């Protein structure tokens, strides 16, 4: 039982370290060939939105709106991939490494 608790504490420390690392990493999603970009932390917090002047057409605001949404989705996808690559190996260890049902 003590070994099991020790393994759980180690896993908890590794998960906390991975979450801290994610908070410090950034990913950028783009749309429109780079006309719009959205930068997010690994935890999904938006830190920057960049819009190239060429993307701004007062007569076509809807296209710009679509580009912003697409860039946000691209950044979110990148965050999900980053999270899976950092947390996946750790989460996989919960079931096999600890042998706890349901984890």
Image (cartoon, rainbow, N blue to C red):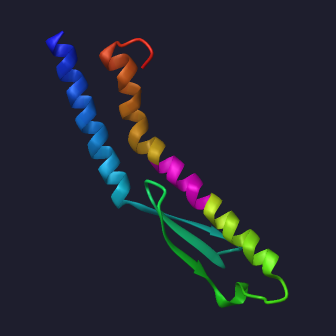
Q: Residue at x 34, y 12 (%)?
A: 99
Percent position (x, y) of residue 41?
43, 61
Percent position of residue 56, x then y: 72, 87
Q: Is residue 78 left or right of residue 59?
A: left
What's the magenta region? 74-82
User: Percent position (x, y) of residue 78?
Assistant: 54, 55
Q: Is residue 83 magenta?
A: no
Residue lying at the far right in this picture: please name it.
59
**Splitting the image into 4 quarters, where does residue 94 fall?**
top left
- Foreground residue, 58 or 82? 58
The quarter of the rendered structure image containing the C terminus is top left
Which part of the image, by quadrant, shows the N terminus?
top left
Q: Residue at x 81, y 75 (%)?
A: 62
Residue 57 location in percent, x, y?
78, 88
Q: Is residue 9 above or below residue 77?
A: above
Please determine whether, in this image, residue 80 is positioned above or below residue 73.
above
Q: Main secondary structure of the magenta part?
A: helix
Is residue 79 shown in magenta? yes
Q: Residue furthest top?
A: 1
Indicate the quadrant where residue 32 lies: bottom right
Q: How many marks?
A: 0
Q: Residue at x 14, y 13 (%)?
A: 2
The quadrant holding residue 49 is bottom right
């Amino acid at each position: 039982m003590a070994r099991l608790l020790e393994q759980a504490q180690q896993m908890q420390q590794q998960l906390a370290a991975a979450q801290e690392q994610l908070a410090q990493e950034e990913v950028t999603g783009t749309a429109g060939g780079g006309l719009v970009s959205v930068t997010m932390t690994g935890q999904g917090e938006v830190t920057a939105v960049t819009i190239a002047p060429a993307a701004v057409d007062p007569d076509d605001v809807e296209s710009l709106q679509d580009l912003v949404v697409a860039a946000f989705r691209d950044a979110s996808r990148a965050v999900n991939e980053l999270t899976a690559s950092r947390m996946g190996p750790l989460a996989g260890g919960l079931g096999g490494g600890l042998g706890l049902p349901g984890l």
